[in-house]
Amino acid sequence: MSTSGSSLYYYEVCSYAAGIAGNIFAFVLFLSPIPTFKRIIKNKSTEQFSGLPYIYSFLNCLICGWYGLPWVTHGAILVATVNSFGALFQLFYCILFIIYSEKGKKVNVSVLLVGVLCSFALIASVSLELLQGKARQNFVGYLSIASLVSMFASPLSIIRLVIRTKSVEFMPFHLSLATFFMSISFFAYGVLLHDFFIYIPNGIGTALGTMQLLFYSYFSKKAIEQYKLPLIVS
């Protein structure tokens, strides 16, 4: 095998490995809300949990899955496969959230879910009927950046709750950790593919994931220190 052939083979192996790692961490991310929904089902209430992360994640999976399909982008099939499974998981979580929400929140999340489905139908129709080639990829690609950044930024509302309550009770650690590792993996995958539409949003996701983990670490430590304070006996 020539030097150039060996380099190309190594490059392809690294790209594929990064994509597989992204798929694995994404699957962990899809499973990470299970403890949260066990609590919701047990208490028959969504309490102060927000449904926005699941709505944003559902929209993101639909758009990014569409971007990875061959008639939009060549060579990014690992993006399509993982997001197809992700869309199914997020839809299931959204339905559960609606079932166990109080009336006001139930209506809001239902309206958002219908809006997501209608928006994706419009995106798919426009990209197929009105655009071709690079124009189609750019259209869906920029939308995928917007949806990914929205998804990564959606936990910022939970961070505000953490700061206000000084508690990480409603900020699931596994969700933040899985998001962080998935973002790093797909950032590397996008860099290796030289795909701007993959590495830019996942680079932003890595930064936001790091911020979430730092907040979690800080407030968890504060809670432990407060718990260990000696009782003052008068």
Image (spheres, helix red, strand yellow):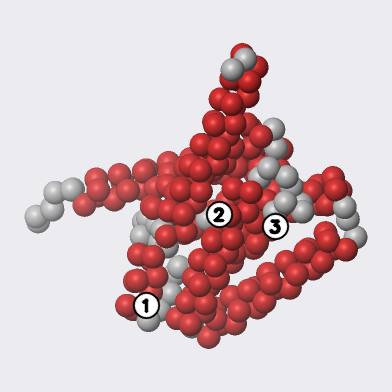
- In the image, taking residue 149 as reference, residue 222 lies left or right, namely left
Mark in front: 1 vs 3: 3
Q: Which residue is drawn at 63% across and 54% down?
A: 80
From this view, report whether residue 97 is shown above or below residue 65.
below
Q: Name the residue under label 1.
A: 41
User: How far apart, in angstroms, are the residues tagged by discs 1 and 3?
Assistant: 32 Å
User: How far apart, in angstroms, are the residues tagged by discs 3 and 2?
Assistant: 11 Å
Q: Mark 3 points at which residue?
A: 66
Residue found at the far top of this picture? 3
Mark in front: 2 vs 1: 2
Q: Nearer the viewer, residue 108 or 199?
A: 199
User: Disc number at residue 82?
Assistant: 2
Tag 1 secondary structure: helix
Give the quarter of the figure containing the N terminus. top right
Image position, residue 98 (x, y; %): 52, 79
Image position, residue 56 (x, y; %): 60, 62
Amino acid identity at mark 1: Ile
